[in-house]
Image: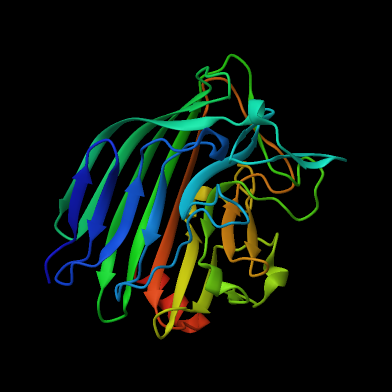
Amino acid sequence: MSGPGIVHVHGDRVTVTAPDSGVELLTYVYRPEAAWEAPKPYVHPLRTLSGAVVTDYRPNDHRWHKGLQLTASHLSGQNLWGGNSYVHGEGYLPLPDRVGSMAHAGFDEVTADGDRAVIAERLTWHPHSGELWAEEERRIEVHGIDAGSGSWALTWTTAVTNRRDEPLLFGSPTTAGRAMAGYTGLFWRGPRGWREGRIIGPDGEGPHLMATQSPWLAYCAEHDGVDGHATLVFAHAPDNDHLGERGEHPAHWFVRNEPFAAVAPSWAFFDELELAPGDTLRRRYRIVVADGAWERERITGRLEALPW
């Protein structure tokens, strides 16, 4: 089997295609969009090997939900997530002067070689007023394409460096006072038909896995439009220290199957993450995109077959 293909429409998007079938596995859109939605690059559509779409884009409940994207819902008083901003005691308010952006600065690599495609990008992070707050190096890899298992893998690596002369404070609505709304960081929004899907963890199953800690979490649901199910597995790299045992800030899962499907390995669920001037926040995640309804044993077996 040949390797993945890649098509770059300059100034707009990069699309990665599956070998042989030509299915568009992902489209990475980096053109700026509406200011109210906190412009930032995103992946949509994301597809299984069979071509089924497993992301949503600008749903009517949250127009700033765009497939799979790296977000910062609360960042030193700014909102690099989009839409209304949560204010404790007042709820979500339209505060456009808090809505910032993550801007594409350039690509270091856009290649498809052998069994892997790579998108390596530089970005800048800005508050609404436009100053440079952070620089990011991002690497998205498509690999592990396996027709036998009906799955492929996306590895997302990010390194965010604070360029302010004061700490950057990464938070979430929960750190601002809203219970169980710790979303921030890498965020996936599933299709509308994926409501009430299965949430599967290493040691349990169900919505109660919200705010828990584990090396991986999976979401499984049945498609609208086409027959069958799909399973997405979200995994921490071993170097993430998601439990905080090696001195890094701990991570907790933000996950919902009502009123919509969403997963985020939140890097600031209960407590703010403080990034000192000049320091770099590094995180690496893997998403296995699989056709079919996978059970725990199959999930763990596939993860073990994909070395970091």
Residue 97 pos. (x, y %): 65, 25
Quadrant into which the C terminus falls: bottom left
Residue at the front extreme of this rendering: 60
Q: Residue at x 55, y 73 (%)?
A: 194
Towards the viewer: 208 or 249: 208
| Left or right: where 14 falls relative to 242 | left
Residue at the right extreme of this rendering: 89
Quick check: 208 above or below 249? Answer: below
Query: Image quarter for residue 110?
Result: top left
| Left or right: where 226 falls relative to 35 | left
Q: Residue at x 64, y 78 (%)?
A: 205
Q: How many numbered marks appear? A: 0
Quadrant into which the N terminus falls: bottom left
Q: How is the image coloured?
A: rainbow
Query: Image quarter for residue 203?
Result: bottom right
Residue 65 pos. (x, y %): 54, 51
Towards the viewer: 57 or 113: 57
Residue 21 pos. (x, y %): 18, 72
Quick check: 134 above or below 148? Answer: above
Quick check: 299 above or below 140? Answer: below
> Could one spot residue 308 in this view of the protein?
no
Residue 37 pos. (x, y %): 55, 40
Q: Residue at x 83, y 39 (%)?
A: 88
Quick check: 34 above or below 156? Answer: above
